[in-house]
Amino acid sequence: MTTIGFVGLGNMGAPMARNLLKAGHVIAVYDVSTDAMERLEGVRMATSAADAARGAAFVVTMLPAGRHVREAVLGPSGVAGATDTGTILIDCSTIDVATAREIAAGAGRPFLDAPVSGGVMGAEAGTLTFMVGGPADAFACAEPILRCMGKTVVHCGDAGAGQAAKACNNMLLAISMIGTCEAFVLAEKLGLSHEALFDVASKSSGQCWSLTTYCPVPGPVPGSPANRDYKPGFTAELMVKDLGLAQEAATANGASTPMGARALELYRDFLAQGGEGSDFSGIIRLLRGGVNGAGD
Ligand code: NAD
């Protein structure tokens, strides 16, 4: 049994905190929304991030963006000032690599950037993938805590390496999803059935996760969002966020990522044309020429 502070109880944070509770840990929570804290039973409700962190061996943050994490860790009511130097800080938010490194350098105690993949379903089921950057000894201490919330936990390297892995992975995912959608759109124009393309490509060189696990047309993969009118899943808004972080990192570090840049433009167009709230695989509607039903 370990005492853990948890800051940020949104769509992801709340089920993650529940899984820590289920594993028998003692949890103190803080969220700017009192409602979000009240929805969680069996925890101590704190009055600030610092209050949630008091006496904790680990503090987990799960917040929207880098500025929120900086405030929650380094701010006047932040966790760094309220913990002893042995407390391990684990940020599971998706934020930019540069801010993750800046917070790690300023925290004065071990800080791990540990963004996740697996979405709300993975958070609820405790099957998230954690990609972790930071000191190896802190990672070894934190791994059992992360395993209460996830199935796969990978140490990717020094500070920022977790966020770097997340940015690279999600840029690749966006590009492969758009490529998969384009192949189905071309097949439709050529009179080739979805099933026929799926049967061939899933067994040949076009095979990828966007096709075989998350197929953007209904039918071949019954569990994919395409079968429920593109209800998320992983929203197009979050994909735009992650592609933006990847492009920011590419620009800051001189990497050439023209496909990632184009994927960001296409996802922005998708949002502008009514794709808000849709799963990211719904971009097939944009590629067919319409978002609000016209492209089906
Ligand atoms: P969310 O908006 O549902 O939750 C964020 C929570 O943080 C809210 O409850 C909000 O009140 C709280 N908050 C904001 N500022 C705060 C502050 N200063 N102090 C305390 N609490 C504060 O977001 P989410 O979907 O849970 O995502 C959290 C993070 O996980 C994001 O970085 C997101 O990119 C990442 N992520 C989300 C998904 C997903 O499918 N939702 C998947 C992978 C990664």
Image (cartoon, rainbow, N blue to C red):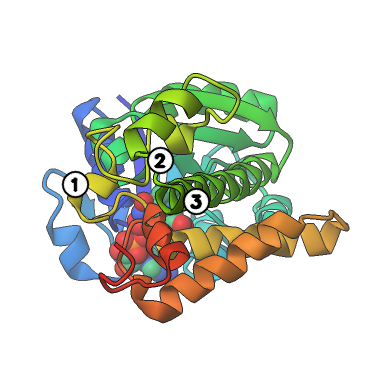
Under mark 3, the amino acid is: Leu
Give the residue pinned by disc 1: 43
Give the answer, above or below, for where 19 lies relative to 245.
above
Q: Earlier in the sequence, mark 2 or mark 3?
A: 3
Would you say 253 lies left or right of 166 here?
A: right
For the N terminus, the quadrant is top left
Which residue: 21% across, 50% down? 44
Instruction: Count neighbours of disc 1 (C-alpha within 10 A) and say few if under 14, some if 14 to 19, many if 20 or more.
Output: some
Q: Position of residue 102 (x, y in %)?
A: 72, 58
Foreground of the two, 60 or 229: 229
Q: Position of residue 185 (x, y in %)?
A: 45, 53
Q: CA distance from mark 1 to mark 2?
A: 55 Å
Would you say 19 lies left or right of 247 here?
A: left
Give the residue pinned by disc 3: 186
Q: CA distance from mark 3 to mark 1?
A: 53 Å
Which residue: 49% across, 51% down? 186
Instruction: Count neighbours of disc 2 (C-alpha within 10 A) and say few if under 14, some if 14 to 19, many if 20 or more.
Output: few
Give the residue pinned by disc 2: 192
Which residue: 68% across, 45% down? 164
Give the answer, above or below, for where 114 lies relative to 281.
above
Q: Position of residue 50 (x, y in %)?
A: 43, 60
Is label 1 in a helix, a strand or a loop?
loop
